[in-house]
Image (tube, grey):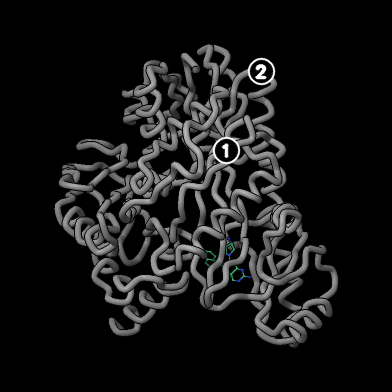
Amino acid sequence: MFSKVLIANRGEIAVRVIRACRELGISTVAVYSDLDRDALHVRLADEAYALGGQTAAESYIDADKILDVIQRSGAEAVHPGYGFFSENSDFARRITDLGVAFIGPGPDAIDVMGDKISARLAAEKVGVHGVPGSTEILTDAQKVVDFGNEFGFPVAIKAAYGGGGRGMKVVHSAEEAEAALESAQREALSYFGRDECYMERYLTKPRHVEVQLIADSQGNCVYLGTRDCSAQRRHQKLIEEAPAPGIPDEILDAMGEAAVKVAKGCDYVNAGTVEFLYQDGGFYYLEMNTRLQVEHPVTELITGVDLVELQLRVAAGEALPFTQEDVTITGHAIECRINAEDPFKFTPSPGRITSYHPPGGPGIRVDSHIYQGYFVPPHYDSLIGKVIAYGESREQAIRRMRIALSEMAVQGIQTNIPLHQDLLLDERFVKGGTSIHYLEQKLAQQKLEKG
Ligand code: MV4
């Protein structure tokens, strides 16, 4: 096992990784920007190195600065967290070229999954299918028209090097095809620097269901249940839960087995997540995330697995300490992402936290880096913490979350806690199984009613 690990990240995930390292007796190295001088991850780490700079580009995603600290600190491994360099194969390569372990998949697996067409081809190669579509690069709008006439409209045009829905165009009829393709290519070029696009049948009311998996370097790969991440707004997840509610176990198991096939197909090692769209009883491969995700705690609570500890063990060459048969899903977990933002305008609300009272009680976990007196900088994403509630049933988890959020007090900035409380009382949400569009439809309806 490593004796010293560098965490190339900030905020709640840096704190989370430091805690896992401390449990394993691993010494920790933090890096921080000028704005994060007083951040919790800096206080908790055994060593901390200033990167200088304010923005992420000047600090956390300045590879030369991070690599310099790796060498100065003598760190034997680097945990990238999520975001930042977590899915950057060049960064992973530069680290492994130094003989330092990258706590994540190999760079080749990152590359395969980073290109959505090659990711789709990799899945199809092992018999895991996405939504009916094409994997050829789209050059002619007539192809979109022919596809729509054969499989039905709407048709989604997507950026091959995209993600997060940016640049995705939905074509509702043949007449729209030409303009949509041009617009998709133009946006893909400006967002991602690559204009290649492909198409799929557009599902109009899917749920976003994903499978957590972990693979070791000895060829073992296990899935750790599912998560439903459909409660999102403009591709920003708000509430995630595990397992995905209201889906028959045999379908959940089939999704898990499909995810493992995709991972094995690209010699995947470490933690990863395979995303599916689920609609009308069918599931369709969407993409694979080659990193630990924000919402990993809900999986930890229903399986009893510490995913970050497993990541460290697997990166150090250990075999998984369990097989698929050992994995049991117990109870239900739900996570609310707490953002420093206006709860209904969604505008950022940075500033000093003048008082902070985290919730507690049975089944409640808080993963956060804030404290009384902490200044929330405007330069990074607005996530200030996650409240996770575990219950023997989904109903109990929701009830406990409502109680926890009513206890939680964050003064000095605005947070989206009121939005979570509103959603957790929404009878359609409480029933379960809402699509990826539900929250936006609900918010639009509320806006109309407010006038
Ligand atoms: C889709 C889809 C419906 N049909 N593909 C958006 C981001 C990227 N991950 C893929 N996305 C979607 N692809 C087909 N064929 C709907 C979405 C989508 C979405 C997917 C998951 C979670 C949230 C979403 C929000 C809007 C659209």
| Residue ID for mark 2 | 98
Q: Is there any visible trace of residue 111 in the rendered image?
A: yes
Marks 1/2: CA–CA distance: 23 Å
Along the viewing direction, whichever of 37 and 422 lies nearer the viewer: 422
Residue in the image at 37% along x and 38% along y: 12
Query: Residue 369 is drawn in which quadrant?
Result: top left
Residue 215 marker: 1
Label disc, if present, on residue 62 of the rendered structure = none
Give the residue displayed 39% in from the left and 36% down from the top. Answer: 306
Name the spot of residue 363 as percent of width and height, x first.
22, 48
Secondary element at image label 2: loop
Q: Is residue 304 left or right of residue 393?
A: right
Q: Nearer the viewer, residue 338 or 309?
A: 309
Residue placed at 51% from the left, 58% from the top? 253
Q: Is residue 451 above or below residue 3?
A: below
Q: In x, y percent, where is residue 32?
A: 44, 27
